Image (cartoon, grey):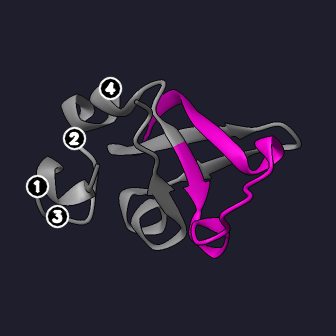
């Protein structure tokens, strides 16, 4: 899944963010690893609206990360779970 399907712009809309809830993600630095450890996979656990900006909360086993659309697209890749 690509963020391009959610439209352009530097901020998530509420609709875009809620459609991503429970999606699985991996950090871009780990996306080419064929033997990806389970603790490298996160999921989008929440949506925050701060000062009119929508951000995603991404939960990994050892951390929680709060990201804007720009940071999310720079740092994360969505996993296709089939």
Query: Which x, y percent locates residue 41?
Result: 68, 44
In terms of sequence position, does the residue under pointer 3 or pointer 4 come before the other?
A: 3
Marks 4/2: CA–CA distance: 9 Å
Up-down relation of residue 43 to residue 9 (above or below)? above
Is the C-beta separation of discs 4 and 1 under 8 Å?
no
Residue 26 occupies which quadrant of the picture?
bottom right
Is the C-beta separation of discs 1 and 3 under 8 Å?
yes
Marks 4/1: CA–CA distance: 14 Å
Residue 18: numbered disc: 4
- Badge 3 element: loop
**Of circles 1 and 2, which is in front?**
1
Residue 7: numbered disc: 1
Query: Which x, y percent locates residue 78?
Result: 43, 50
Residue nearest the viewer, comparing 31 with 65:
31
Is the C-beta separation of discs 1 and 2 under 8 Å?
yes
Residue 13: numbered disc: 2
Q: 3 left or right of 49?
A: left
Is the C-beta separation of discs 3 and 2 under 8 Å?
yes
Q: Residues within 10 Å of mark 4 (few under 14, many from 20)?
A: some
- Badge 2 element: loop
Q: Residues within 10 Å of mark 3 (few under 14, many from 20)?
A: few
- Badge 4 element: helix
Marks 3/2: CA–CA distance: 9 Å
Residue at coordinates 21% horizontally, 41% vertically from top-left?
Answer: 13
In terms of sequence position, does the residue under pointer 4 or pointer 2 come before the other?
A: 2
Residue designated by label 3: 9
Residue at coordinates 38% horizontally, 67% vertically from top-left?
Answer: 70
Task: Magenta stretch: give its range.
Answer: 25-50
Residue nearest the viewer, comparing 38 with 78:
38
């Amino acid at each position: 899944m690509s963020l391009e399907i959610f439209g352009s712009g530097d901020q998530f809309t509420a609709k875009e963010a809620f459609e991503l809830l429970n999606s699985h993600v991996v950090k871009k630095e780990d996306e080419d690893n064929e033997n990806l450890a389970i603790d490298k996979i996160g999921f989008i656990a929440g949506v925050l609206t701060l000062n009119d900006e929508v951000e995603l909360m991404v939960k990994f086993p050892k951390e929680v990360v709060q990201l804007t659309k720009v940071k999310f697209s720079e740092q994360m890749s969505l996993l296709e779970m089939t």
